[in-house]
Image (cartoon, rainbow, N blue to C red):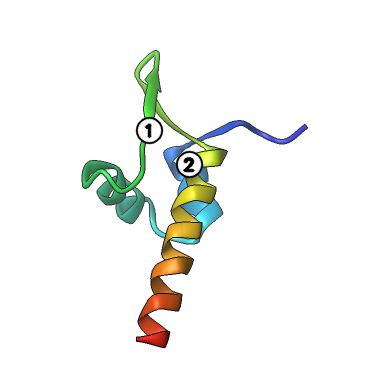
Amino acid sequence: MDRLSHDVKASADRVHVSRATMWRLIQDGEINSFKIRGKRYITEAELLRYLAQQEQAERERVTA
């Protein structure tokens, strides 16, 4: 069964960025997250949304 959410470290690993970068993306509001019992999580859907947004921005940059 696929995971529905990941902690910050696993999320960073999924999108191939450092943990510090993932925290910065969360703090800057680029990635939405939530807490359960003091631990922060990011949904798989949110990671996919972020990656799609980055891909679209790169396409626009290349074609501009």
CA distance for labels 1 and 2: 8 Å
Asked if residue 64 is positioned above or below residue 11 in the image, the reply reads below
Q: In which quadrant of the rendered image does the C terminus lie?
A: bottom left
Q: In which quadrant of the rendered image does the N terminus lie?
A: top right
- Is disc 1 in contact with disc 2, using a CB cutoff of under 8 Å? yes
| Outermost residue toward the bottom in this view | 63
Tag shown at residue 46: 2
Q: Which amino acid does label 1 sit on?
A: Ser
**Residue at figure coordinates x 41%, y 85% from the top left:** 62
- Residue 29 falls in which quadrant of the image? top left
| Outermost residue toward the top in this view | 37
Q: Is mark 2 on a helix, strand or loop?
A: helix
Q: How crowded is mark 2: few (under 14 residues within 10 Å), some or many (20 or more)?
A: some
Task: Depth check: give the residue in front, 20 or 27.
Answer: 27
Q: Which of marks 1 and 2 is nearer the N terminus?
A: 1
Estimate the x, y position of residue 5 in percent, counting from the top left.
55, 32
| Outermost residue toward the left in this view | 28
**Residue at figure coordinates x 39%, y 69% from the top left:** 57
Estimate the x, y position of residue 48 in percent, counting from the top left.
54, 49
Q: Which amino acid does label 2 sit on?
A: Glu
Q: Name the residue under label 1.
A: 33
Q: In this view, does 48 lie to the left or right of 2?
A: left
Asked if residue 46 is positioned above or below residue 62 in the image, the reply reads above
Estimate the x, y position of residue 27 in percent, counting from the top left.
22, 42
Q: Which of marks 1 and 2 is in front?
A: 2
**Residue at figure coordinates x 41%, y 86% from the top left:** 63
Query: How many dots with numbers?
Result: 2
Q: How crowded is mark 1: few (under 14 residues within 10 Å), some or many (20 or more)?
A: some
Q: What element carries label 1?
A: loop
Tag shown at residue 3: none
Estimate the x, y position of residue 39 in percent, counting from the top left.
39, 24
Q: In this view, does 51 lie to the left or right of 64?
A: right
